[in-house]
Image: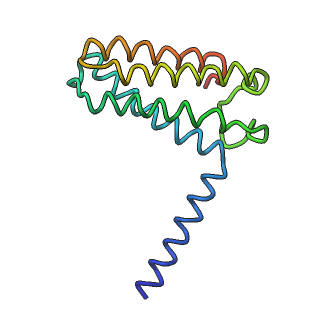
Amino acid sequence: MNRTLLAAAAVVIGITAVAAQSDPIAQRKEIMKGVGAQTKTGAAMAKGEAPFDQAKATQIFTTYEDAAAKMPNLFPANSKSGGETTAAAKIWEDMDGFKKGFTEFGADAKAAKGNVKDLDSFKANFGNVTKNCGGCHETYRVKKS
């Protein structure tokens, strides 16, 4: 009985994982949740609300770099709507510019990861990398009301 339940649970989990992988909107949301969580951690360190932690700083920039590599491929034409997306039509109208933004974000994150040695260098690099976020969101995201 227990084996049957475990097997059924494994199948359900597997189906859920496959469904999420085939849904670019869900994948985008999941990646951005991770970016948001890391940004919250980084902001707390930069503001002095949390102590500077080199390992966390590295993880923040690694998450950004990973997101920058994955996100440009998650905007196929069939994902313009549905799934409560906040992706603006401008993405598909200016895909080259959109992808360029992720390239810059990834390059800045990679450079930051190698440059951070202490709180001051973290603050400078964190600010430089996260400025990419606002530029992209301003142009390529539908504002929530």
Q: Residue furthest bottom?
A: 1
Q: Is residue 100 above or below residue 82?
A: above
Residue at (75, 35) in percent of width and height:
80
- Location of residue 66 in the rendering, given as x and y in whole percent from the top left corner: 49, 35
Residue 139 rendering spot, x and y as whole percentages: 66, 16
Residue located at (63% from left, 22% from top)? 143
Dividing the picture into quadrants, the one containing residue 100 is top right
Which x, y percent locates residue 13? 52, 65
> Which quadrant of the figure contains the C terminus?
top right
Quick check: 121 left or right of 88?
A: left
Q: How is the image coloured?
A: rainbow
Q: Quadrant of residue 58?
A: top left
- The front one of 107 and 68 is 107
Residue at screen point 66% across, 44% down = 24
State left or right for residue 84 relative to residue 129.
right
Q: Which residue is more in the foreground, 99 or 25? A: 99
From the viewer's perspective, is 10 left or right of 112? right
Relative to 136, say whether 38 is above or below. Answer: below
Residue 134: x and y in percent read 54, 16
Residue at 28% from the left image edge and 16% from the top image edge = 47
